[in-house]
Amino acid sequence: MDQKVYPGKPYPLGATWDGEGVNFALYADNATGVELCLFSSEDDKTEQQKITLSERSHEVWHAYLPGLKPGQLYGYRVDGPFEPENGHRFNRNKLLIDPYAKSIAGVIEWNDALYAYEIGSEAEDLSFSETDSAPYIPKSVVIDQNFDWGDDKRLNIPYHQSIIYEAHVKGFTQLCADIPEEMRGKYCGIGHPATIEYLKKLGVTAIELMPVHQFISDNNLAEKGLSNYWGYNSIGFFAPDVRYAGNGVLGEQVQEFKEMVKELHKAGIEVILDVVYNHTGEGNQLGPTLSFKGIDNASYYRLTEDKRYYMDYTGTGNTLNAMLPNVLRYIMDSLRYWITEMHVDGFRFDLAATLARELREVNKLSSFFEIIYQDPVISQVKLIAEPWDIGEDGYQVGKFPPGWGEWNGKFRDCMRDYWRGADSVLGEFAQRLTGSADLYQDDNRKPTASINFITAHDGFTLNDLVTYNDKHNDANGEDNNDGESNNRSWNCGVEGPTDDETINKLREQQKKNLLTTLFLSQGVPMLVAGDEFGRTQQGNNNAYCQDNEISWLNWDSMDKELLGFTQKLIALRQEHPAFRRRRWFRGRPTDEGVEDIGWFLPEGNEMGEENWSNDFAKSLAIFLNGKGLHYVDQKGENVIDDNFYLIFNAYHEPLDYVIPEKIRGREWKKVLDTGEGQPEEKANVVNDVITVSGRSIILLQQAVTND
């Protein structure tokens, strides 16, 4: 039967089912023709029906097909000039993924047909391929967006109460015996009761999922028998990646993702997505034509003066052009969709500096930021920047506008240097510990603008940070040339695993030092999945292509003692607002005449200006005044906490610390000592002098009365 075709509407973009049929709308400004191709199954080598879209409203081609239902597979063929030298790469022989597809049924099968030019031609990308790519490209899917959310809504956990947990959908559950085998590595595995129980016991408030947008696994990796595990190579910015679908690929993955979010929300856990809007998986001029390139290359990508080539601020071959209105709309539509339809609570933007580039400079007043500020939906969720890219002046830590959190790379570097014994001044250590006011305070931002981390998905795990001096990335197939060489790590005396009990004890202590520093610093802590129980990648600091036991969490080798330490450390932070302030320290006396924060030397004297700049100083103590928090709770009551005395000793020998006379009085109790293991179950009363072990932290607590 011939399919009826009605004019349809240019909005919304994508394929929209209304219960009676489907409206298709595609932005393609420079195109001269668009064909909608319908398929009956994922295995079809060619389309069952081809429909010419004759309606065009401005830059959008559209049609309405009555009778079509969710599960319908489709793609586009787009005609226009093939003039790479002018930025145009149209080739109607290539089936294209709908940029607005809400579901994509499968992954690409690498073949020369996926390229718009003839592979092997001397003319390279200036040649023209006439081979049909339809057999090798996954089809877009029409979905039913209806879902029973019940009373689910965004949790809106304040930043100062947040603890972020970075995890990979597959890697977190793939080896977890508590999850049914068919659910491991899937969205439903993250939403499984065993996962949620673990996250709740750990104490985190948000899970930050590494990319879940449909992504491309590079051909060069496939040729090595590897794959893109991390997923920072998106092609479908509305579609949950099909690899993590456990219940089907014809839209079922959307329902599965929503169910995962719903279950996490029931447990009080937010969902933050790591998103990659700076580039796509189509690579440079020699990359494949899968979607944007063939739909309207010049309207999506940043091109050089010679329009054959792409600007590359990301190291991936291309950069999406966020200066163009249609690209900005695309990004905003995608963000809004994940908030309104998928109920996510926020985003971490990969290489976010790229999105703020206008011409070549990074501009915090760029259109990207202006539109987000004006959007009543996007502006209300958590927005976290990875504030750098590889372009000129790409390191933008501290330079994002108010309302944004930032991965604080300076916190990571400073704290690693301090605990490995590198020459560094205590002044920077103090800045990072107290929320990095030097980076964020002048813009009227708060300490919570700083997303603090010791490790992240890229780089060493916490265990490897204290086990290896050098990267060991041979499994990546690049002769160990990939990955960061300057890791600010220290192996404690031996490279890699050892039977030396002294070194192993020191490594365990260093892990606790780094975790304690992370969770007792002002700002928002981010913990990488598995660091809490000693996960290792065997020294691989760039496991982007290791979809195997190198990357997956090994639950059988869990360090339960370290896990218990981390759980208690998180509980300590959550119980005491002194470690998660909403406002900056003022350095002013409270009504008792003692400042809200004080800095002390071992003999109990306050630190002077000369002490801050000594690059050999390895030890200091900090007094946190429980009456100096300077904010009220939701009911308008002043927030008051106990007093704390925090002693850091990165020196290799023990030091005696005298409790300063001005803060003596009520008894101090020791609640944490990384030199002794677990946080104290029953706090010990301490004298006015306390011995701090080499390379350790002691935390003392003093009760405060609210009078």
Image (cartoon, grey):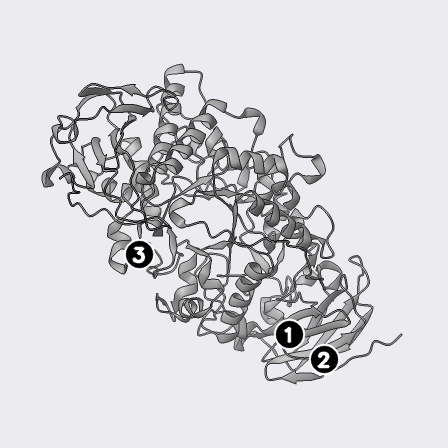
Q: Is residue 284 left or right of residue 609?
A: right
Q: Which of pointers 1 and 3 lies earlier in the amino acid sequence?
A: 1
Q: Which residue is mark 3?
A: 445
| Amino acid type of the residue tagged 2 in the rendering | Leu
Tell me how far mark 1 sits from mark 2, CA to CA: 10 Å
Q: Residues within 10 Å of mark 1 (few under 14, many from 20)?
A: many
Q: Amino acid at mark 3?
A: Arg
What amino acid is labelled 1 in the image? Answer: Leu
User: Nearer the observer, disc 1 or disc 3?
Assistant: 3
Which residue position is annotated with label 1? 26
Q: Quadrant of the N terminus?
A: bottom right
Q: Residue at x 56, y 50 (%)?
A: 231
What residue appears at the point 53 percent right and 62 percent down from the top-left corner? 335
Q: Residue furthest right?
A: 1
- Residue 455, visible in the rendered structure: yes
For the residues bearing labels 1 and 2, Cβ distance under 8 angstroms: yes
Which residue is drawn at the image coordinates 81% and 61% (left, top)? 44
Instruction: Using the rendered view, name the quadrant where residue 171 is placed.
Output: top right
The residue lying toward the viewer, choosing from 320 and 455, is 455
Ranked by sequence position, the earlier of labels 3 and 2 is 2
Q: Which mark is residue 298?
A: none
365 relative to 215 in the view: left or right = left
Q: Which residue is mark 2?
A: 53
Quadrant assignment, res 29: bottom right
Indicate the secondary structure of the residue bearing disc 1: strand
Foreground residue, 320 or 518? 518
Location of residue 325 in the rendering, given as x and y in whole percent from the top left corner: 49, 75
Please give the name of the residue rendered at 16% of the width and 31% of the height, measured from the top-left corner. 663
Counting residues from the N terminus, which is met first, the one under dot 1 or under dot 2? 1
* Residue 592, horizontal then vertical, whole percent: 15, 38
Provide residue 151's location: percent of width, then percent of height: 60, 53
How many numbered circles does the render carry? 3
